[in-house]
Image (cartoon, rainbow, N blue to C red):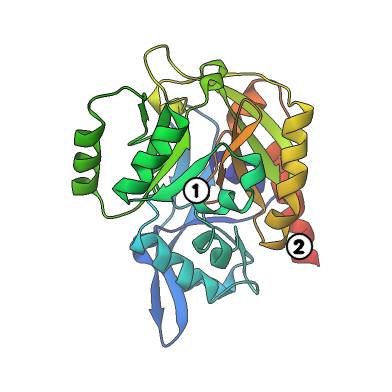
Amino acid sequence: GFALMLEAQSRSHDLHYYHPDSLAMEDGAVSALVHPLEVRDIAGDHFTLGEGRRERLEGFDVVLMRQDPPFDLHYITATHFLERIHPKTLVVNDPFHVRNAPEKILVTTFPQLMPATLVTRDFAAIRAFRKEKGDIVMKPLYGHGGAGVFRIRKDDENFGSFLDTFAALTREPWVIQQYLPAVRDGDKRILLVDGAFAGAVNRVPAPDDLRSNMVRGGAAETTEISAREREICETIGPTLRERGIILAGIDVIGGTLTEINVTAPTRIRAIRRLGGPDIAARVWDVIEAKRRG
């Protein structure tokens, strides 16, 4: 998000900030408490916020929906509000399709690109899947940032207790996938802009952790994409473009697609820092072209 703000400001666009908690809909009109914003790439002095005032969002050209998960009813309500102003005000990404394409569900549109995957909270189905596949990974369907991701080995005697504990903590289903040993070599984050490959970074998990998320101690390293990974991008690209997903981040392990992130995909600055392309500039090229169109 910060990279996108810096790029917008460099193009002389006026920036404003609002918090989703301030969204309101009165007689069908959507407004928010909006603050003028200036940003700087200076450690410890990143921004200046002006005085806030309530404004109708339909008066703005573009709204970047960079609301962090969890993907809960608060999040879903924000997509309903923003859907009222789109596309007259361009919302990036399209709020209708963000709401209807959670990362771990949209990806199941492409089972031929994925590891063996089950989505359920039915114990019998999970046990049968584990018996057939051996080592599995379980994660909450609407989880984020690597929270609640577990590897369950085929001989793990804690499996039953784990299911009971998980079931007591959440009412949502789980995603159960066949464990991919290639994760030790990294979980590649590939960014697509308007459905086309834009850049990639490899995230290598810490030695004592399954998860490669940066917030979980993963390390970023420069990478190229393989022919298989380019094929994945070309396969899913048209679907992303049709749904108004201008910026998406996909996760690929060993040439296998595991997630399509459309809520607030990150790693723009990491890719640039490692010598990769300026993805923020590509995003704004697309936004400006859509506004002109």
| Image x and y of residue 198, in percent | 73, 38
What is the distance, in whole Å, between disc 2 and disc 1 at their CAs? Answer: 28 Å
For the residue pair 129 and 293, the one nearer the viewer reads as: 129
Binning the other alpha carbons within 10 Å of mark 2 as few (below 14), some (14 to 19) or many (20 upward) gives few
Q: Is residue 132 above or below residue 237?
A: above
Q: Quadrant of residue 64?
A: bottom right
Q: Where does the image place residue 232, in percent across and percent down from the top left?
A: 72, 39
The quadrant of the picture occupied by the C terminus is bottom right
Which residue appears at 65% of the width and 40% of the height? Answer: 113
Helix or strand or loop: what does disc 2 sit on?
A: helix
Quadrant placement of the N terminus: top right
Q: Position of residue 96 (x, y in %)?
A: 55, 67
Q: Residue at x 35, y 36 (%)?
A: 147
- Look at mark 2 in the image and give the residue it sits on: 290
Residue at 32% x, 22% y: name it.
Answer: 155
- What kind of residue is marked 1? Lys
Residue type pointed to by label 2: Lys
Q: Neighbour class for label 1 at 10 Å: few (<14), some, many (≥20)?
A: many
The residue at the far top in this view is 207
Q: For mark 1, what is the residue?
A: 104
Give the residue furthest to the bottom: 27
Q: Earlier in the sequence, mark 2 or mark 1?
A: 1
Q: Is residue 11 visible?
A: no
